[in-house]
Amino acid sequence: MTDSDSDEESALELRSRRTIYQHVRANPGIHFRALLDDLEYAQGTLQYHLRWLENRALLEESDDGKYTRYYPAETFDEADQAVMNALRREYARRIVAHLAVEGALSTAELSERLDRSPSTVSWHLSKLEDADLVTKERRGRTVAYELYDPERVQYLYTVHRKSFTDRVVDRLFDLWDSY
């Protein structure tokens, strides 16, 4: 047993702290409110233990612009966290899945597939672009979007698939796997 294993073991002696840590490991990129709902701890208790785990470098937090998300420390680099942050948001995940399976698509095409307004899809695409997950290319009067690194997306989705609950996206990725 190494010193770091010993430190981690002693840091996780408390059942509540160990439960929080294990839940984050099982659901990387989970946000605070979901942890609160899943674990049913008081808000202050959860905040205290999350901060404690972060201060001891067992967890890292990532701000995706809307939520603070939690990751096991030193497991996900910044690019992986950006992908996971997107995969944790329902419509961003669905956009990513369509782009992964179908390749470059316009806002109008994505809007039709998702049954959402073009402005909603455009908003999600701009967030994905800000996170360097999609690129865009003007094609005449339309703009086509595609994934910047589809292999990274597929890998992270496949490895953490059980922590997502979206049958629509599962079916799309199953289709991709069958090619």
Image (cartoon, rainbow, N blue to C red):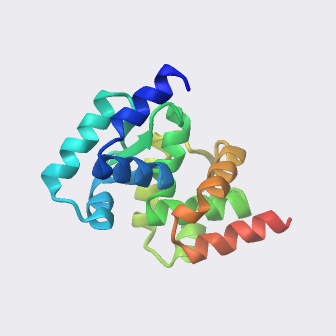
| Quadrant in the rendering for residue 42 | bottom left
Residue lying farthest front? 1
- Nearest the viewer among 144 and 178 is 178
Relative to 49, residue 40 above or below:
below
Where is residue 124, by image quadrant? Answer: bottom left
Residue at position x 43%, y 51% in the image:
22
Q: Position of residue 104 (x, y in %)?
A: 68, 56
Residue, far top = 3
Name the quadrant of the C terminus.
bottom right
Residue at point 49% right, 29% down?
5
Would residue 94 appear left or right of 173 to someone viewing this image? left
Q: Is residue 117 left or right of residue 112?
A: left
Say above or below: 30 vs 59.
below
Quarter of image, res 38: bottom left
Q: Do we see residue 143 in this rendering?
A: no
x and y percent of residue 162 in the render?
Answer: 58, 64
Where residue 108 sits in the image (x, y, percent)? 55, 68
Question: In the current view of this chain or complex, which residue is farthest to the left?
Answer: 44
At 32% from the left and 61% from the top, the residue drawn is 34
Q: State the quadrant of the N terminus.
A: top right
